[in-house]
Amino acid sequence: MSKTTSAPDVPAPEGQGDAVSERSAEGVERRLTLRAYHLWEEAAGERVMPAPAAISGSGLAALRDNAFVIGFADGDYLEARFLEVGAAIAAETGPVAPDTPIRDVPQNSLLSRLADYYLQAIAHKAPVGFEAEFEHPPGETVLYRGILLPFAEEEDVVERLLGVLSWKVVPAEAAAAAPPAPEKSSRTTSPAATEATPAAGPSIADDIGLQGALAACRTAAERLKSQEARSHEALYTALAKAYAFFLLSELQPAPYAALLRQAEIRAQERAPLTPVLKLIFGRDYPKARLTEYAAALAHVRRRKVRADEVRDFISGFEGGLKGLVAAERAARRAERGARSPDRLAAARRRLDSTPRLPIDRHGITAPGEEPYVLLLARRTDAEHVEPVAIVESKEAKLVGTLHRTAMRLERNARKARQRRKRKKESA
């Protein structure tokens, strides 16, 4: 297979031009991420991605202090783990034991930011460069740049990701006044932590990664369905995987659409999480549960929770899954309310001009066989109302209204009896 990636054309950061583009006597690019990209490209040759053995090659090994390796438990792309972490990065974030899941590294650290990028490298089978900043600790800003490089023994299956990072720590006010130009961190003594600029390979969208992620999601869903695994932990794990799959599907719309067609599931623009859940749990899964899961994950999306933090976010949310569903429904009601004042005013104007329903000696004319109907009344003064319309409603809504009304009348009658009893006893 011919190789389709090419070296990116990356401009030097402002104020760093000559120094950044300077090369050593051996002609090796001194910018860290570009050096990593060129070494990855050289190792790949005519392959789409180099084999994992190339990670320990002399060129890439020279970047070890500022590099890390990500692997996947049992080939599950949603269970990303750090297999190795370079000394310079560990000095910045603290020690990271081998086989540590991404979600378990210290929060608000350099390594915790990688959850935003690694699925993209898997989806595209190509290098993904990134550049951003964050505050840590208060009063300081970390400016960082990095690149994630995929490796595969078989050309269609990403087995490892090699990441290379450079960064610097500056006062927050200085970061706000200047564009990011990461260089060796002041907390690091590694000679490899030199200036870096982002690299980005071309987008090669296919279903590699998507199929593997779907298989992992379905495995988690099957565990949840089994009697012995029905627990909050199993549910939250399955939903976290489903959400990560949803994010991955957004990167690969064409393969995702093919999966939906194959499963005979319709895409839903207004409820994009529902088809994802049907794909994972099955179309015969109870609809009420799928609706609940979709609402919960919609709130996760609304809150912009990172994929590796979803499980802990759900378990830590007040009320758990039910609390998330309630929060999402409340947010939707608030959105509808924010849009509705004009519509409500128009409806009131229309009803203000509607004549009252005629009342004869038999009552109000309302053809039909239902023993009860709902009436909409308009207030005429502080003490009186007049009926203006018969409200059409589904049976379930009518039954609910009847039940609530009967309960309220019963409470009122009970309170009246208690008042009469107290009055009688006091007399």
Image (cartoon, rainbow, N blue to C red):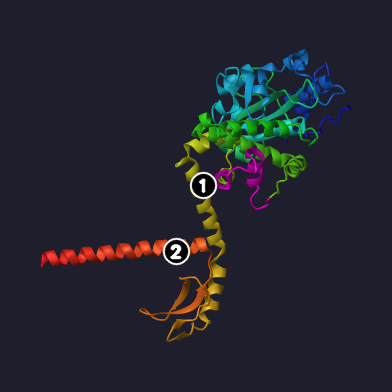
Secondary structure of residue under mark 2: helix
The x and y percentages for residue 413 are 28, 66
Which image quadrant: the N terminus?
Answer: top right
In-front residue for pair 21/330: 330
Is residue 276 located in the magenta-colored stretch of the structure?
yes
Q: Quadrant of residue 284?
A: top right
* 104 on left or right of 386: right
The x and y percentages for residue 185 are 62, 24
In-front residue for pair 198/162: 162
> What main secondary structure does the magenta stretch of the protein show?
helix
Seen in the picture, residue 353 relative to 418 is either above or below; the reply is below
Which image quadrant: the C terminus?
Answer: bottom left
Q: Quadrant of residue 209?
A: top right
- Res. 414 in view: yes
The x and y percentages for residue 399 are 46, 62
What residue do we see at 77% from left, 14% from top?
A: 57
Q: Nearer the viewer, mark 1 or mark 2?
A: 2
Residue that mark 1 sits on: 325
Q: Residue furthest right?
A: 2
The x and y percentages for residue 145 are 68, 30
Span shown in magenta = 268-297
Seen in the picture, residue 45 relative to 177 is either above or below; the reply is above
In-front residue for pair 75/341: 75
Tell me the kind of residue under disc 2: Thr
Tell me the kind of residue under disc 1: Val
- Give the CA distance from mark 1 to mark 2: 23 Å
Q: Residue furthest front?
A: 369
Residue that mark 2 sits on: 401
Say if mark 1 contacts mark 2, CB within 8 Å.
no
* 365 on left or right of 51: left
Secondary structure of residue under mark 1: helix
Is residue 318 located in the magenta-colored stretch of the structure?
no
